[in-house]
Image (cartoon, rainbow, N blue to C red):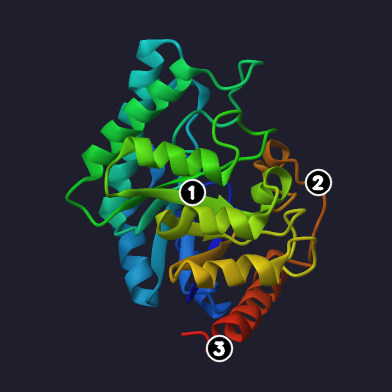
Amino acid sequence: MRFGINSLLFTDTFVERDLALFARARGLGFDLLEISPVDLDAFPAAAVRRAAADEGMAINMNFALPAEANTISPDRAVRRRGVDLSKRVVDACVAVGAGIYCGANYCAWKYFTGKPRSEDEWLWGVECYREIAEHAAGSDLLIAAETLNRFESHFLNTAADARRFIDEVGTANVAVHLDTFHMIREEDDMAAAIRLCGDKLGYFHACGSQRGVPGKDLVPWVDALTALREVGYRDGITIESFHPDLSIAPLVAVWRHFAATPDDLAAEGRAFLERTCAEIWGEPHG
């Protein structure tokens, strides 16, 4: 099992000055750095690939579509911008050797109509996601759709939503991305939701129920991680948290410190997950 940390705990985007995060994450015991290149124009893809290789770190990429590039918009031109932007993200993922392109990558993050998801939105989303997935075909990249809680999206809130979505997209390079922070707000049974995804579960965020340190929260960790073992999941388990002093904090409603430092949050969370996984899988990390 590989353990990862999201770069947004330390920085608002990922540019040249953030390359040292690979060594920092490695020093904290992580195998995987999930990076969020909010500004694609300033994203140093070649340098990122070298830095990851130097530290022996795997890379995943997380990107949330903005309102002007919304793939479920009723405006065809906006949907087209969403597909085109997503293809640029896919190209960046391939350039750095990322394994997974994850996150709110199927519609604009925090886009709401004031109504439940419509059939038109569903069809638009499936059509656009299929085109994006076909653009990535031939690479080793897996595209994973993350379920979000009701305060961040009305489109894919549950594992059942995401499983149906990727099944209808129908390409071999798409999967479900689950996150315990969102799941504890939307699922009736977290372990059952994981089992429902089965071998279509492509990526897993292990996040505190309050975005804090995993293990110091309300997530039913033993049940969730046992379900991961039961479905044969062997990929990355990544912590996604945020620092209240960064500009992203208001967007994710993080107003307080969950640990003395970001490094403490990351290291404490990794130690808990590593220890618990070793007990459940019956084997040490690595």
Q: CA distance from mark 3 to mark 1?
A: 33 Å
Location of residue 232 by image quarter: bottom left
> Which of the marked residues, 3 or 1, is nearer the chain's N terminus?
1
Q: Amino acid at mark 3?
A: Gly
Residue for badge 2? 255
Q: Amino acid at mark 2?
A: Trp
Q: Say which mark, if any, is on residue 274.
A: none
Q: Foreground: 244 or 274?
A: 274
Q: Position of residue 8 (x, y in %)?
A: 58, 52
Please report the residue visible at 34 percent of the width from the left and 27 percent of the height from the top: 128
Residue for badge 1? 36
Work out which residue is located at the far top of the displayed protein and give it. Answer: 75
Q: Kindly check if marks 2 and 3 are in contact, taking CB atoms under 8 A apart as contact.
A: no
Q: Position of residue 201 (x, y in %)?
A: 45, 56
Residue for badge 3? 282
Mark 2 lies on a secondary structure that is: loop
